[in-house]
Structures are given as structure tokens and as C-alpha cells.
Amino acid sequence: MIVKVDRSAFKQTTWHQYVLRFAMGGFITVAAGVIANARGPVVGGLFLAFPAIFPATATLIARHEQQRKTRHGLNGVQRGISAAAVDAAGTALGSIGLAAFASVNWWLLASRPAAVALTVATAAWFVVAAAVWLLWKRRRRTRQVHSR
């Protein structure tokens, strides 16, 4: 898989889909705030770490892929599910990097200036996210070779 920016996706997404993503993100953020009020900031922070727009994005990805296949006279249901699953896997991998970011911040913010803590945490996020992605890619490639 080659990671690239696909600008055509902006043309496929309508304004109401952006509103849906914004609303879902806002709802999840408010829910995390309510949980933080009831159970404390540590528990609330765990819920805030949930990728806020993921539910709306997964639904839209599945729908776009299904519509693309349908335009070509094919049943795109399975393709839509597969595309959403790949996005979910990427979200899970990205969440590991976010956990590293949060952990480093939690560890450093009590004893270091915020700028230092955030810089080190951002570096930790990048290193962990890149390492997880490379490991996933290597494992996937190894599985493909052994399945032949």
C-alpha cells in the first residue's frame, strides 16, 4: 500500500457529510466531558482519545466504495465493508501512537515545561506510529508470502 493524498475525495464528499462528521466529533467530545465530570479527568481523557470522527468516516467510506462499484454495475457491499475495515485498522494503529503521546505527556507534564513535554510527546507519537505501521506492513507482507 502506498500512502498518498487523494484530492478527488473532496469532490466526492458533500457538505452534509462534513456536517455529520463535525456533529459526531462534537457529540463524542461532549460525551467524554460528561464522563470526565462524573468519573474524573483520567477516565474522561480515555474516552476523548477515541477518534471522534471515526464512526461517521467509516460509514461514509463504506457508502462511497459501494456507490463506486454500483456505478460500474457491480455489487459493492463487500468492497465497502472491506474499505471501512482497512480504515478501522489504520485508526487502531494510529491510536497506539496517540496512546504513546498521552503517556509521555502524563509522565512529563508534572515535571517539565509544557513545550518540552509536548515536543517529546509528539516525537514519541511519530516514532511509535511509524514503527507500528512498519511492523504491520512487514507482518502483512510475510503473511502474503507464506500463503502462496
Image: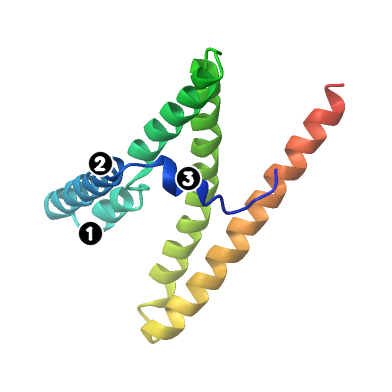
Q: What is the x, y in percent for residue 104?
A: 47, 68
For mark 2, what is the residue?
16
Residue located 48% across and 45% down the image:
9
Residue 80 located left or right of residue 44 = right
Residue located 35% across and 47% down the image:
50
Residue located 47% across and 64% down the image:
101
Residue located 18% across and 46% down the image:
31
User: In this rendering, is residue 11 above or below 64?
Assistant: below
Type of colouring? rainbow
User: In this rendering, is residue 65 above or below 22?
Assistant: above
Q: What is the x, y in percent for residue 69?
A: 54, 21
Q: Quadrant of the C terminus?
A: top right
The three-letter code of the residue at mark 2 reads His
Where residue 83 sits, quadrant-wise, is top right
The disc placed on residue 41 is 1
User: In this rendering, is residue 101 above or below 53?
Assistant: below
Q: Nearer the viewer, mark 2 or mark 1?
A: 2
Residue 3 located left or right of residue 32 = right
Mark 1 near mark 3, Cβ–Cβ under 8 Å? no
Q: CA distance from mark 1 to mark 3?
A: 36 Å
Characterize the local packing of mark 1: few (<14), some (14-19) or many (20 or more) Cα atoms within 10 angstroms: some
Q: Secondary structure at mark 3?
A: helix
Q: CA distance from mark 2 to mark 1?
A: 32 Å
For mark 3, what is the residue?
9
The tag earlier along the polypeptide, 1 or 3, is: 3
Mark 2 near mark 1, Cβ–Cβ under 8 Å? no
The tag earlier along the polypeptide, 2 or 3, is: 3
The tag earlier along the polypeptide, 2 or 1, is: 2
The three-letter code of the residue at mark 3 reads Ala
Q: Secondary structure at mark 2?
A: helix
The disc placed on residue 107 is none
Residue 107 vs residue 54, the one in the foreground? 54
